[in-house]
Amino acid sequence: MAAIADAAIVVPAKASKGYWASVGSRLIKDKVAMVALTIILLIVLAAILAPYIAPADPFRGSMIRRLRPIGTPGYPLGADELGRDMLTRLIYGGRLSIFMGVVPVLAAFVVGSGIGIFAGYVGGWVNTLLMRIIDVFFAFPSVLLAIALSGALGAGILNSIVSLTIVFIPQIARVAESVTTQIRTRDYVEAARVSGAGAFTIVRVHVLGNVLGPIFVYSTGLISVSMILASGLSFLGLGVKPPEPEWGLMLNTLRTAIYTQPLVAALPGLMIFMTSISFNLFSDGLRSAMEVKQ
Amino acid sequence: MTMIIDRLGPVPEVGDDRGGPGTPLLAVKDLIKHFGKKAGFLTKAGAVVRAVDGVTFDVGKGETLGIVGESGCGKSTVARLIMQIIAPDSGDLLFDGEAVGSEQLDLTSYRKQVQMIFQDSYASLNPRLTVEDTVAFGPRVHGASAKQSITLAHDLLHRVGLEPARFAGRYPHEISGGQRQRVNIARGLALNPRLLILDEAVSALDKSVEAQVLNLLLDLKEEFGLTYIFISHDLNVVRFMSDRVMVMYLGRVAEVGPADAVFSNPSHPYTSALLASMPSMDPDNRTQEAPITGDPPNPINPPPGCRFHTRCKFVADVCKTKEPALTDVGGLHYTACHMADPTSGHPNALNAARAA
């Protein structure tokens, strides 16, 4: 009788590929996501290799060559208000900007997923209690919360990372909680419970694999937000301190030159825009690659 | 309790036939489960759904008990209560003479012996696990080594008609519905249970695949010495599978008895109506009108007296006030209808008594 059921199935040439392999093959076909990924990789690579590829010293200024336009000999992207090479500073700036974009999201991903999955799986009053506490953070706009926390902790890179992490934890925890609550009532989780597995085993084998994907996609989208918020904090003088090259801070110091050299002044903003939109487009592509079929 | 002398003997192993052939494998007594919101901080008590409202039945060793009824009559809730997925409000579960959750039979060893096959073959398989990992999960949890449990999974897959060489490494979305349900059956067998609860296990399958899976279930029952609780709304399938049949209506047992007796000589008007509602296979003898119309009453507020009286064509005054108890109509056949009880005061009761 099995023969009848099997006849309809074409025998695969090789063992079926895993879920992530099929996500990967769909992602590669997504042109927009691939372009975005390429841009991200180029910026990251440039930031890592900055000492080798940057044409000048990011800190050495020249009082007689301040605010040169794009295309000045020796200054391919112009010079800033202290006569430092813009191209060099943009390359070096990627280091801190991307660091400030990724690290808070990564930290919040770990903590937020933990809280959300725990609350979602345990359910009941524990869930209600944790989620109501999380809701308190939603009462503040994230920009204000980041500024308030940074202001309270004091200026500095570490403090900005801490405050950004705190801003993102509730958002990720909420997503994690809602996905976990959905998964928890699936028949396969009940079947696992029926087979006598403990909560820890069920979460490890049956829940994590099914919730981490959506949480990860959501978190990828937050990287751009984190970069913009970090730039905002630097702009306000709460994040990175001068003369450290960082896109947000560069945007801040160059704003006085908006009338004399508008194109040069806009460059750091352009970098923030390009990087964050690339992260957004890539996370969109990842989402649709993962959604097709489970 | 009746087996005090037995208990003095050597302590039986988990999985052994402890109570002897006379003890029902599973005895359910006065099971009650009401869903609803209890009054809490800042909330008022919500409406209470009486999903299962005092259900008592036994399942003998090696038999198949079919449970039938319309949607919402509490069939699946009974299954989930037996599986301890949800906790009953009250009532007792005795498995082979031992209370479930007692010292003699803790939840872990009970769960090794009772497994369940779910209706939705897709939702009951983890999309991220291969077929072999799904089947091997249970044995792994109960302490088998990775190698042992995979070997066992391959054996079981072979047994349910899925060649491990081709299917073991596949994911649920890569196989058909019938094949998925075979995987679910293999998983159910992986812990070597004694009782298998099949909750609408074949309802979502094509008719041809359904027949294959039903035959597989019959073969497995013989091979592994299983006992089945077979829940379905499909009367033909229940008749084909079951030794005894229990008909449920609005959270209560309407009729229970040997399958042949219930199907050929139903003694509850609801059972008769259900049977009459089956499409006729004979074109010269078409089903003319629906013998039962409308939906069952809302279980939030079930009618007083006999719950079926709002749709019953034999309704009398006594039905609206007094709830009928399960009455023996002979041959281990019980029915919860006033007409079967000569002392109930129902005008048809005497005729029924005479006919019986």
Image (cartoon, coloured by chain):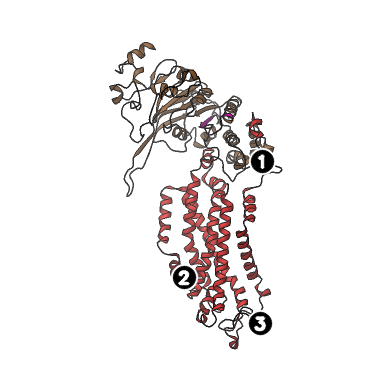
Chain colours: A red, B brown
Mark 1: amino acid: Lys
Q: Which of marks 2 and 3 is in front?
A: 3
Give the residue pinned by disc 3. Answer: A74
Q: Which residue is drawn at 36% across and 42% down?
A: B37
Give the residue pinned by disc 1. Answer: B147
Q: In which quarter of the image is residue A13?
A: top right
Q: Mark 3 or mark 2, which is nearer the start of the sequence? A: 3
Give the residue pinned by disc 2. Answer: A150
In the image, farthest residue toward the top: B354
Where A106 sits versus B120, above or below? Answer: below
Residue B338 visible in image:
yes
Q: What element carries label 3?
A: loop
The stretch of residues the image draws in magenta is B194-208
Q: Mark 3 lies on which chain?
A: A
Position in image of residue B330 (x %, y %): 42, 15
Position in image of residue B91 (x %, y %): 40, 31
The foreground one among B142 and B153 is B153
